[in-house]
Image (cartoon, rainbow, N blue to C red):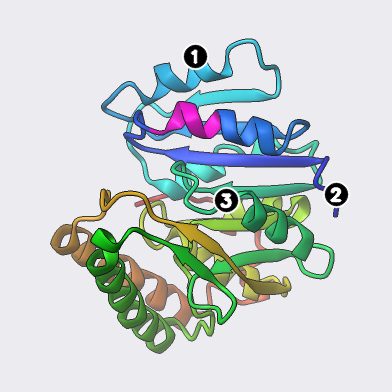
Amino acid sequence: MTRENLAVVVPCFNEALVIGRSIERLREWFPSAAIVVVDDGSEDDTLQRAQAAAAGHALVQTVRLPANRGKGVAVASAVPLVRSRAAVVVVDADLAFGRTTLERAVDALQAVDVAIGNRRHPDSTYGVPVRLFGFLYRRHLLGLLFNVFVRACLGLTHRDTQCGVKAFRATAFQDVMPRLTTAGFAFDLEVLLIARGLGLRVAEIPVAVTIETGRSSVRLLRDGLIALREVGALAARRAVGEYRRSRLARPSAKGGNER
């Protein structure tokens, strides 16, 4: 799988502080890649800053959704824009996962259909200032608890379903994304349920994470309740067999992207 025939999809919501710099970095790291920035109805000037960074660069596209629909909708909206590429990497707008991690994800597609980052992999590394040790510890603990919950409810065995870097062979991206029914926090989980149902090969890769700020878009109480609801909905769909290969093959399975 070549790094030259790559698309990078960057879903973002209220990322005005970082999106311009992130686009510049992605252009530097992957000069021949198509970069698709999807603004998920931001309330700040994310779109304007993305457009300014994209100006004059034919390989950088910006898309704005008219309202905040969720990460799943944002990523799925990029499907028609990356059809000519052999591989697709989805990465968070702050680029906490650097060039080496993205290259490792693409290289893993030589042997698998989907590669997902695993922040708890024995070979993963963190770069974090001392003042953010507490933030990292709390996030790590919450991630472990959520992973236990996910394993119990959905039977997924991956150790880090929510990592902000995922790579797909183009065919896998086009097979999985139109089948999504979950737009929000559980989007990552449904991607893996669909991939498993379709018989796609999924590998976890180590990542190098750099944390520069304790800023987070996650609000524990509100987003925790939403996550419980969404995981419950996925568990119900799984219980009635919606993620079996026979069900996923039906045309009606490609409805998608509802809250």
Front-most of residues 149 and 109: 109
N-terminal-most mark, 2 or 1:
2
The residue that disc 2 covers is 2
As drawn, the label of residue 98 is 3
Q: Which of 47 and 213 is in front in this view?
A: 213
61 vs 240, left or right, is right
The answer to whether residue 251 is visible is no
Mark found first going from the N terminus, 3 or 2? 2
| Quadrant of the rendered image containing residue 59 | top right
**Discs 3/2, front:** 3
Q: Which amino acid does label 2 sit on?
A: Thr
Residue at figure coordinates x 51%, y 26% from the top left: 63
Q: Give the range drawn in magenta.
A: 18-23
Q: In this picture, is 94 found above or below 240?
A: above
Residue matched to label 1: 52
How crowded pointer 1 is (Cα within 10 Å; few <14, some 14-19, many 20+) is rated as few
